[in-house]
Image (tube, rainbow, N blue to C red):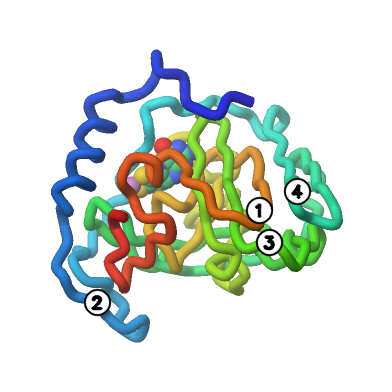
Amino acid sequence: MSDEPDPQGVKEKLIRTKEQWAKAGRGLTGTTADHKERRPPGQRVTEDFPVLDLGIQPNLSQAEWSFSVGGQVANQIKWDWTAFMAQPQVTLTNDIHCVTTWSRYDNEWKGVAMRTLLALAKPLPSVKFLMLKSYDGYSTNIPLADVDRDDVLIAHTWQGQPLARDHGGPVRLVVPPLYFWKSAKWLRHITFMDQDQPGYWEARGYHMRGDPWKEQRYG
Ligand SMILES: Nc1nc2c(c(=O)[nH]1)N[C@H]1C(S)=C(S)[C@@H](COP(=O)(O)O)O[C@H]1N2
Ligand SMILES: [Mo]
């Protein structure tokens, strides 16, 4: 598995622009909000569902998709589509907040709860962080505490329809407490780690955690 996206395929201009935004602190209001506030500071609500990625959209059928879990866990996991769909399924409705300042409310997802995966994999007590790896070469890091929650899931369905390819189908992560760049599309692998490491955007000026209510856009 390559650790970086194929430079041939990526949208260089978009990546440079987002690096500039991080340097300039674009979108920062300098305020924070309590999590009781539905809308995080500096966000505006949209009804659209914009597509944001590096420009490489893997074309994976359900049969071609597989997913694995490794690193500091008691049990490594490897799921093909059938094994994934055999897990207990949940339906959750939540809000998403993109660091480029749009938010979209009331997204209905179906999939496997992150807590189901955690209960099976059993991260060792040393684990504090996860690294997510995707089929387009994308990666992102997340604190364990931000996924060990009832509202985090590995999703295959959005608004009653199979998750579209451009939104990360067949399978993506959905992590509502953090900016949406942490919600890896075309999910391929999760590594459990005791030390934090930057993923794709975190290595390009974006925050290691990314709490929208604290405006952790850049860092
Ligand atoms: N694999 C992968 N996941 C990704 C990305 C990406 O480029 N590749 N982009 C992230 C970013 S920056 C955002 S804002 C959301 C966008 O998800 P959407 O296209 O479904 O709106 O996906 C995140 N997950
Ligand atoms: Mo994003």
Q: Secondary structure at mark 2?
A: loop
Residue drawn 43% across the image and 39% down it: 200
Task: Answer above or below: position of 200 versus 36.
Answer: above
How far apart are the alpha carbons under marks 4 and 1? 23 Å
Q: Secondary structure at mark 3?
A: loop
Name the residue carrying label 1.
193
How far apart are the alpha carbons under marks 4 and 3? 23 Å
Question: Can residue 217 be seen in this snapshot?
Answer: yes
Task: Answer above or below: position of 40 versus 200.
Answer: below
The amino acid pointed to by label 4 is Phe
Tell whether label 1 touches label 3 (CB within 8 Å). yes
Tell whether label 3 touches label 4 (CB within 8 Å). no
Judge left or right: residue 89 versus residue 16: right
| For marks 4 and 3 on the same chain, the one whose residue lies earlier in the sequence | 4
Q: Position of residue 26 (x, y in %)?
A: 15, 52
Name the residue carrying label 2.
32
Nearest-to-viewer mark from 4 and 1: 1
How far apart are the alpha carbons under marks 4 and 2? 38 Å
Q: Bin the neighbour count of mark 4 within 10 Å (Cα to Cα): few under 14, some 14-19, many 20 and up.
A: some
Residue drawn 46% across the image and 19% down it: 6
